[in-house]
Image (cartoon, rainbow, N blue to C red):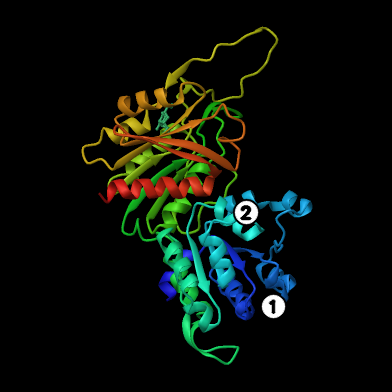
Amino acid sequence: MERNLKSLVNKNILLGVSGGIAAYKSAEIVRHLRKVGASVHVVMTKSAEEFITPLTLQALSGNRVSTELLDVEAEAAMGHIELAKWADGILIAPATANTLARLANGRGDDLLSTITLAFDGPISLAPAMNQAMWGDERTQDNIKKLETQNFQICGPGSGEQACGDVGMGRMLEPLEILDLFSYSFNEGKMAGKSILITAGPTQEPIDPVRFITNRSSGKMGYSLAQSAIDYGAKVTLISGPVNLEPPSNCNFISIKTADEMFEAVMHHVNDKDVYIGTAAVSDYKPAKMQNNKIKKDGSNSSITLELEENKDILKSVSALKHRPFVVGFAAETNDVIENAEKKLSSKDLDLIVANDVSKKEIGFDSEENEVTLVTSADNYLIERQSKKKVSNKIIEFISERIND
Ligand code: C5P
């Protein structure tokens, strides 16, 4: 069990609670999720509030509990679409007969059902109801329908029920549910793989106080490093200067110039299965670094800086005899896919991630991104969502290609 729950570390979990007597066990589910390092947001149905107070679940989750679909104030904080985007997985425990019926029919008449419609990740349901209700043909039809729609059904168990009946319908215990839920995440897909990632900008010194650099927060590369770790890979992250904490369990190498990044990459690339170059490497560096600060002495209204080309690190990696699966990034402002395709072939890459940086709401400093994965065979759009989710999808895509 320990091993599986690891896949919940750092996950954003939306816990849906519907109105059944088993709702008291939801508090324990929240506690376990927090303990393994997941972030939890609880969404309760109206009737769930009759069984357990939002305050309890709020205190345990550390996040405001959401209950209303049409609450202006709540929507301003984190509305149903934001919650669906935020979550990596949804667990509904307990899931009553009514909730199952509503989900099976795609209803969107309260906050929880609406979120499940807007969400495109794994959803697990832990049914809890009286044994006669569970055995009813209509409930069983709903369960079959939900299974074909890829909902994971956790339980129920059998035994003595709160109403005194004995039979199927008891909600599983919190740890049993979480054990099953943890299988929703595809961790392990990168187990045993080594990945080298570059991130951030490089700095090319002009003199002791000035340098040439590129705009890059490093967020995409750091997020990819975290995703790869979550998927079980061993990660080496080579980064230029950024304001980010590197993931705790990676081999982290800090560099400043493109030459230093090149050296570090060539030193570490040998035994790697995948190379991902997200770094915004400066294409040029001053031909000569001045040892003293260049002075403004009044005699020159302009100065000339001679630049020379830096080595293309990505191209050098793909030219290696024993090359890893090579992934590049293309930050483009126009003809995004066309330019990415050109780079894919000129740099001889296995995959290029095309990013339209002319759109303010994505790329650079933003928390969200929308990218197209371009290979010689196909293109695959990852729609606008958090950089974390985009990273997960990129790593999943790579894992499918290298495990083929
Ligand atoms: O040619 P362009 O700089 O647009 O290509 C971007 C891709 O190439 C990125 O993956 C970037 O990390 C990589 N690159 C590199 N070395 C350079 C320039 C870019 O590895 N000198």
Q: State the image quarter where residue 128 is shown.
A: bottom right
Element type at mark 1:
loop
Residue tagged by mark 1?
Answer: 51
Q: Residue at x 61, y 64 (%)?
A: 40
Residue 332 visible: yes
Disc 1 residue: CB within 8 Å of ligand 1? no
Q: Which mark is residue 83?
A: 2
Q: Quadrant of the N terminus?
A: bottom left
State the separation of the CA atoms marked 2 and 1: 23 Å
The x and y percentages for residue 157 are 46, 82
| Number of residue marks | 2
Disc 2 residue: CB within 8 Å of ligand 1? no
Three-letter code for the amino acid on which mark 2 is drawn: Leu
Element type at mark 2:
helix
- Residue 289 sits above or below residue 164 on the image: above
Left or right: 129 as drawn, with respect to 374 = right
Residue 348 versus residue 142: which sits nearer the camera? 142
The x and y percentages for residue 23 are 63, 77
The x and y percentages for residue 28 are 60, 78
Q: State the image quarter where residue 37 is shown.
A: bottom right
Name of the residue lying farthest toward the left: 321
Q: Which mark is residue 362?
A: none
Residue 277 versus residue 100: which sits nearer the camera? 100
Q: Residues within 10 Å of mark 1 (few under 14, many from 20)?
A: some
Three-letter code for the amino acid on which mark 1 is drawn: Phe
Left or right: 234 as drawn, with respect to 65 = left
Q: Residue at x 30, y 26 (%)?
A: 345
